[in-house]
Amino acid sequence: MIQQTELVGDWSNAEGAKVHVSAGHNFSASGIKQTVPDYKCPTEMAGTWRFRAQNGPPTSFVASESATEGESFVVSVNADSSAGWCDLQGQVQHDDQGFSICLVMDLDQSCTADELLRKASTRPR
């Protein structure tokens, strides 16, 4: 589980993908095909993000306006309604290097080590 304050910031991978997550729930990305190879939408994208929160039964989740932590989030692309299929899911993971983000079209997908996004600065302040 990641707190919103930990998610906010700049994320990237060695392949050239760059993502910015803001506290105001804005999301922007460049080089997105370097983290989501099957992404058919523009490689430069902007949108909004929301944590997925449990809604009822343990397997029911929705994008929440008020959640401040989560294991996954939804990115809604700023485009006309016909581009809803451009939306992404983000799965937050944690390992010995800290948090990483795996962006996918569907949460049943996974990322290779090269596709994972890591926060630009993970050093304690």
Image (cartoon, helix red, strand yellow):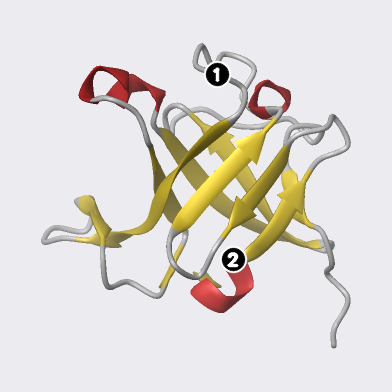
Q: Is residue 57 left or right of residue 65?
A: left
Q: In percent of the image, x 54 and y 32: which residue is there?
A: 45
| Callout 1 crowding tier (Cα within 10 Å): few <14, some 14–19, many ≥20 | few
Callout count: 2
Above or below residue 80? Residue 8 is below
Q: Dots 2 and 1: beta carbons under 8 Å?
A: no
Q: Nearer the viewer, residue 30 or 91?
A: 30
- Residue 19, labelled with which disc? none
Tell me, for residue 42, which label it has, or none: 1
- Please state which of residues 68 and 54 is positioned toward the viewer in this rendering: 68
Between 19 and 70, the residue placed more toward the observer is 19
Going from N to C along the chain, the mark reached first, 2 or 1, is 2
Residue type indicated by callout 1: Pro
Q: CA distance from mark 2 to mark 1?
A: 23 Å
Quadrant where the C terminus lies? bottom right
Local secondary structure at mark 1: loop
Above/below status of 41 relative to 107:
above
The answer to whether 50 appears left or right of 92 in the picture is: left
Q: Residue at x 83, y 32 (%)?
A: 16
- Mark 2 surroundings: few (<14), some (14-19) or many (≥20) residues within 10 A: many
Which residue bears the numbered disc 2?
7
Residue 64 lies left or right of residue 112; in this view the side is: left
Relative vertical location of residue 4 with respect to residue 44 in this rendering, above or below: below
- State which quadrant residue 87 falls in: top left
Q: Amino acid at mark 2?
A: Leu
Name the outermost residue toward the bottom: 125
Q: Position of residue 38 (x, y in %)?
A: 57, 13
Q: Position of residue 9 (x, y in %)?
A: 67, 64
SS for dot 2:
helix
* Foreground disc of the pair 2, 1: 1
Residue drawn at x 49%, y 16% as measured from the top left: 41
Estimate the x, y position of residue 37 in percent, counting from the top left.
64, 17
